[in-house]
Image: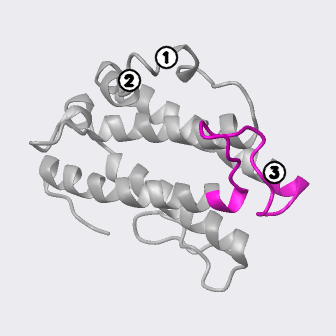
Amino acid sequence: MTTVDEQGRPEPPLDGDETTTLVGFLDFHRATLAWKCAELDADALRATHPPSTMTLGGLLKHLAYVEDYWFSYILAARPRTAPFDTVDWTATPDWDWDSAAEDSPDQLRDLWAATVESSRALVTEALSAGDLTQRASRPRRDGSKPTLRWILVHMVEEYSRHNGHADLLRESIDGRTGE
């Protein structure tokens, strides 16, 4: 049974095995980002905290891209999904961050949520075929193929770092704070 905290986030298990613990922490951090971006309009999702140009909308789109990149493109060796499949990443390396200002709150939240659901399904599929030691199906740019364990730990790190940014941004928007 999953315990849910006062913000609606699933608590990672205190006594789970390695896979359950890693996935539990990733889902907790995903839910933290959703909480930090909840109930905000377009202006709030576009708000910056100078001198940074980072926005909560940019975080949603960036993390949607990161989810797609690691779980779909690298782990499962699937083609990049829309809208990431048509971007010239060499010409516009910050496209995910910059283009978020053009999207509505619903578009940003829906893109992120759909990508997270796809990632969850891909992890479930991978775990049904092997364990955390299995290698990604597609190599990274440097030719290495990380394990599923490495990808999950990296994603926990990615969300943890960006949730710190989300804390500061949300507080600067409306004063709301919390873990």
**Dominant SS in magenta:** loop
Name the quadrant containing residue 75: top right
Query: Residue 56: x, y in percent?
Result: 30, 41
Give amino acid for label 3: Ala
2 or 24: which is nearer to us? 24
Where 109 falls versus 144 (above or below)?
Answer: above
43 or 91: which is nearer to us? 91
Where 23 falls versus 68 (above or below)?
Answer: below
Residue span colored magenta: 126-150
70 or 48: which is nearer to us? 70
Residue most extreme to the front? 142
Query: Residue 60: x, y in percent?
Result: 40, 39
Q: Counting other residues with Cα less than 10 Å from the Cα at mark 2, is it few (<14), some (14-19), or many (20 or more)?
A: some
Residue most extreme to the bottom? 15
Q: Describe residue 19's horizontal placement relative to residue 99 as left or right.
A: right
Q: Looking at the image, do the residues carrying marks 3 and 2 touch, with CB atoms under 8 Å apart?
A: no
Residue most extreme to the left? 50
Name the quadrant containing residue 21: bottom right
Q: Dot 2 lies on which element?
A: helix
Q: Which residue is mark 1?
A: 87
Q: Which mark is residue 126?
A: 3
Tell me the distance, in whole angstroms, between the alpha carbons under discs 3 and 1.
27 Å
Residue found at x 36% / y 30%: 105
Q: Which residue is mark 2?
A: 95
Residue found at x 17% / y 55%: 171
Q: Please identify the quadrant where the N terminus is shown.
A: bottom right
Where 73 falls versus 92 (above or below)?
Answer: below
Q: Looking at the image, do the residues carrying marks 2 and 1 touch, with CB atoms under 8 Å apart?
A: yes
Residue 31: tell me if it is visible: no
Q: Looking at the image, do the residues carrying marks 3 and 1 touch, with CB atoms under 8 Å apart?
A: no
Tell me the distance, in whole angstroms, between the alpha carbons under discs 3 and 2.
29 Å
Tell me the distance, in whole angstroms, between the alpha carbons under discs 2 and 1.
8 Å
